[in-house]
Amino acid sequence: MSSVPQSLYRDEGIVLRTQKLGEADRIITVLTRRTGKVRAVAKGVRRTKSKFGARLEPFSHVDLQLYTGRNLDIVSQAESIRAYGPGIAGDYRAYTAGTAVLETADRLTAEEKEPSLRMFLLVVGALRTLAEGEKPPTLVLDAFLLRAMSVAGWEPALGDCARCGEAGPHRHFSVPAGGSVCPSCRPTGSSMPSPVTIELMEALLSGDWARAEASQGTNRREGSGLVAALLQWHLERGLRSLPLVDRT
Ligand SMILES: [Zn+2]
């Protein structure tokens, strides 16, 4: 008689989502540093005396030991590295932005166990910044969304024409075309956002916080609208959390 040994592995990750399973268990979705997105069963986690305690909650950065299962892996150990939840949940704007970060990360990593170190680092960076509370949450979210699209291969064109590459800046912007478009490529229905808004989006994409934080509310709102429209264009189903982001 031979039995297939379960293989044990260790990784760290951010808990993106949890779902109830049966009476006491939970399925957790974790974006890990090395393995990519993993769905795993945490047994007994809903019992008051669970050995995992409150460690396996969304926004938590945890060190995990897992067994490879037939369908879902099984969490055998969980140690907290850092819980971003308490810092984020105290501010409603940060909480709604953080929820959109987690949902976007989940949706953009469609394939399980496909390593994406860049996405992992983007999520950790966004949650840390939201928990610190020193930057406007909507700017942190939009910077994350722009970079996450870039990691997914959908970096918006914010200078040169999205279609032919002609050197910009261009006045017209087309969501289906993927960003700024020159006069000859411009599809019908293109909009003409403020050039200052496009500059803000460039600053967010490149991490130029001095420029981004000097922006005005009107440009922030226009930029958020364009970022959301670009992201929704690429996703089959819209994000549930994005319309709920508190932008007051
Ligand atoms: Zn063009």
Image (spheres, rainbow, N blue to C red):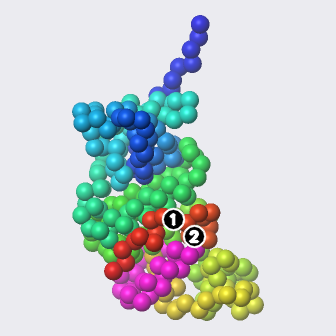
Split into 4 quadrants, where in the image is the N terminus?
A: top right
Q: Which mark is residue 49?
A: none
Spot occupied by residue 217 in the image (x, y as percentages of width and height): 38, 87
- What is the three-letter code of the residue carrying label 2? Gln
Residue 226 sits inside the magenta stretch: yes
Q: Tags 1 and 2 in contact by the CB under 8 Å rule?
A: yes
Q: Does residue 88 appear left or right of residue 119 in this picture?
A: left
Q: Which residues are magenta?
A: 205-230
| Residue drawn 61% across the image and 71% down it | 233
Q: Position of residue 61 (x, y in %)?
A: 35, 49
Q: Is residue 98 left or right of residue 161?
A: left
Disc 1 or 2, which lies upstream in sequence? 2
Give SS at disc 1. loop
Residue 44 picture location, percent across and down: 34, 32
Q: Residue at 33% across / 61% down in the picture?
A: 128
Along the horizontal axis of the image, is 213 left or right of 113?
left
* Visible residue check, residue 10: no
Q: Circle 2: is it few (<14), some (14-19), or many (20+) Cα within 10 Å?
A: some
Q: Of residues 228 and 203, which is closer to you in this image?
A: 228
